[in-house]
Image (tube, rainbow, N blue to C red):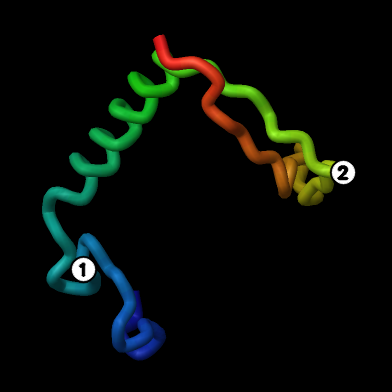
Amino acid sequence: VNAEKIPPYAYTPFGGGQRLCLGKPFAMMEMKIILSIIMQRVNMQPVLTDRISYYLFPSLKPKNVFMKIVDIK
């Protein structure tokens, strides 16, 4: 990360450059595991908007799909 491009009060939880946090890969893996555990325990339902638009990638990716938690197991 180039320090000149970062705004003065930007939130950088793992730092950057030579002082990058050694725990970043572990924290990112831990976040994925916790999110997968949470997602197994909740039922979600899409919040319908007027129209769903898409990003044009090799596969279509929806832009404005929002979900709400319906039930927690």
What's the amino acid at mark 2? Arg
Answer whether labels 2 and 1 touch (C-beta < 8 Å): no
Q: Residue 29: which disc? A: none
Q: Residue 15: which disc? A: 1
Residue drawn where x is 28% and y is 42% of the image: 28
* The C terminus - image quarter: top left
Depth check, mark 2 against mark 1: the one in front is 2
Q: Secondary structure at mark 2?
A: loop
Q: Position of residue 36 (x, y in %)?
A: 38, 23
Q: Nearer the viewer, residue 29 or 68?
A: 68
Residue labelled with disc 2: 51
What's the amino acid at mark 1? Gly
In the image: residue 56, left or right of residue 64: right
Pointer 1: residues within 10 angstroms few (<14), some, or many (20+)?
few
Residue drawn where x is 70% and y is 40% of the image: 65
Q: Is residue 28 above or below residue 13?
A: above
Of all residues shown, which one is farthest toward the top? 73
Please tell me in which quadrant of the rendered image residue 14 appears.
bottom left
Residue drawn where x is 33% and y is 77% of the image: 10
